[in-house]
Structures are given as C-alpha cells and as structure tokens.
Amino acid sequence: MQAPVEEVSPFKLGDIQQLIKKIHSDTGDAVAPYFAFGMVFFLIAFCCYLALAIVSLVLDFQGEILSSNCSVLPRAVAMRAGVTTAAGSAS
C-alpha cells in the first residue's frame, strides 16, 4: 500500500490521460490539453512550495541567530540588528 502523497503526482495524470486515449482516441485527444495544464500546474505548485520552505528555513535560522543572547556577535552587528547586548541597550 502506497502512502497518500505517493498516490498524487503529475505523472499519474499523464497515465490517466493515456488510459482515456486507449479507451476512446477522440476523447483522449480532447482532454490532453487539460491534463497537460494540470501537470504543469502541479509541478509549478511544487516548485513554489519548495521555494517557500527554503525561504522559511533561512529566515527562521537568521531569526534565531539574531535573537540569541550570545556574546559571539560583534557589538556593531548587534547594534545594527537592534539586539540588546549585555553592556547595555543598542542605540
């Protein structure tokens, strides 16, 4: 038994279109553009989801670095970021 994520893929859409074409050629040719659009939409949505995940991870990682109370950060970087240092508040 496959996981639900594996059951949905753009390539399965292509398989369904080929099955329709085997059953009735004219109908398979008629629905082919819609299935092609569905495959392209699915792949673009996946790329956007992947880009969003990468951006979220990068921003989360940067936020953790800037918000940590670590004395490793140089005072100038901490002041530019508005992080309060142990010596006092950033101006």
Image (spheres, rainbow, N blue to C red):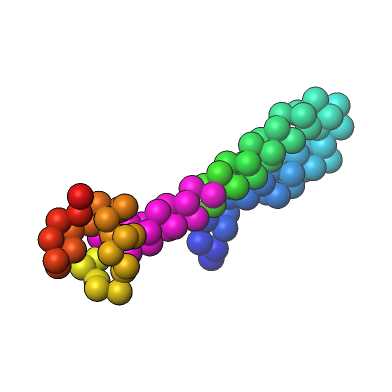
What residue sits 70% from the left and 49% below the top? 11
| Residue 63 visible in the shown view | yes
Residue 81 rendering spot, x and y as whole percentages: 30, 53
**Is 11 positioned to the left or the right of 3 in the image?**
right
- Marks counted in the figure total 0
What residue sits 37% from the left and 59% below the top? 62
Residue 8 rendering spot, x and y as whole percentages: 58, 50
- Give the farthest residue toward the right: 25
What residue sits 49% from the left and 55% below the top? 54
Q: Quadrant of residue 87?
A: bottom left
Judge by depth and name the residue closer to the eye, 29 or 68: 68
Judge by depth and name the residue closer to the eye, 68 or 55: 68
Judge by depth and name the residue closer to the eye, 22 or 30: 30
**Is 28 positioned to the left or the right of 62 in the image?**
right
Residue 48 rendering spot, x and y as whole percentages: 56, 44
- Give the farthest residue toward the bottom: 72
What residue sits 69% from the left and 38% below the top? 40
- Label the magenta part by its dominant secondary structure: helix
**Is 12 positioned to the left or the right of 84 in the image?**
right
**Is 14 positioned to the left or the right of 21 in the image?**
left
Q: Which residues are magenta?
A: 51-67
Judge by depth and name the residue closer to the eye, 84 or 8: 84
Residue 25 rendering spot, x and y as whole percentages: 86, 32
Q: Quadrant of residue 74?
A: bottom left
Q: Quadrant of residue 60?
A: bottom left
